[in-house]
Image (tube, rainbow, N blue to C red):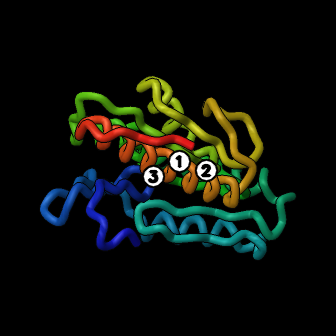
Amino acid sequence: LLHPIEVPIAGSHGLDIYFGSDNYIRPDLSSINFKKLKKDIIESCEKYPELLIEDKGYSIALHYRKNPNLENHAFNIMQQIKSFYPQLKINKGKFVVELIPDQADKGKAIQTILNHLNLPSVSPIFIGDDLTDESGFICINQQSGLTIKVGSGETHAKYRLKDIDDVANFLFLFQNRIKNLYVKNSRNQNGEKICLN
């Protein structure tokens, strides 16, 4: 998705971390039988056809957005199944309950990337819209970075944007501000005079 930009990328709630074509981190998840897990969830959902099952490879999500009244049923199904899979944890999101490996944590993934970059001075920014982003907000807050929650709901984020359009506007303004600072600093270092109108 980001090609040709080469930057560290974390996916699957931080289970997959990519630093470059020769440097890739993924925990050993071979002890978890994901095929059986999916089969168990399918069987448990037979009487609830409005529940949607999403196989994400290293996690299984159960969506109840077609019928929000099924939230408790979805959660109970996943909680019951989790008792047979001690290596998994429950993640709740927007109209979804997910069973994911214990190692999946966006905050830990962010810390791993920051440690890898080993920058002397950094002010990280994390923008998220889901409950699964809260561990990322906590991590970035500990780094004195900028945390932004998109949408409503309780959060550890310090700031909030209304929707995706606001995020796009924020990024555009942020990009312009960085460009202006870079040009100003570059001119100052080269001894050029700056004329401000």
Residue annotated with mark 2: 170
Q: Position of residue 39 (x, y in %)?
A: 53, 71
Residue 54 visible in rendering: yes
Residue annotated with mark 1: 174
Which SS class for mark 3? Answer: helix
The image quadrant where one finds the N terminus is: bottom left
Q: Which residue appears farthest toward the left when viewing the image?
A: 22
In this rendering, the answer to whether 161 lies above or below 164 is above
The image quadrant where one finds the C terminus is: top right
Q: Position of residue 196 (x, y in %)?
A: 51, 41
Alpha-carbon span between mark 3 and mark 2 = 24 Å
Q: Which residue appears farthest toward the right when viewing the image?
A: 69
Give neighbour class at mark 1: few <14, some 14-19, many 20+ (Cα, 10 Å).
Answer: few
User: Residue at image x 59%, y 65%?
Assistant: 41
How many numbered dots are placed on residues in this image? 3
Alpha-carbon span between mark 1 and mark 3 = 26 Å
Which one is earlier in the sequence, the residue at label 3 or at label 2?
3
User: Residue at image x 46%, y 50%?
Assistant: 85
- Image quadrant in which you'd find residue 189: top left
Which three-letter amino acid code belongs to the residue tagged 2?
Answer: Phe
User: Residue at image x 41%, y 40%?
Assistant: 194
Q: Position of residue 83 (x, y in %)?
A: 54, 46
Which three-letter amino acid code belongs to the residue tagged 3?
Answer: His
Closer mark to the observer between disc 3 and disc 2: 2
Which SS class for mark 1? Answer: helix
Closer mark to the observer between disc 1 and disc 3: 1
Which SS class for mark 2? Answer: helix
Label pair 2/1, CB-CB below 8 angstroms: yes
Is 130 situated left or right of 103 in this image? right
Give neighbour class at mark 3: few <14, some 14-19, many 20+ (Cα, 10 Å).
Answer: many
User: Residue at image x 47%, y 40%?
Assistant: 125
Which three-letter amino acid code belongs to the residue tagged 1?
Answer: Phe
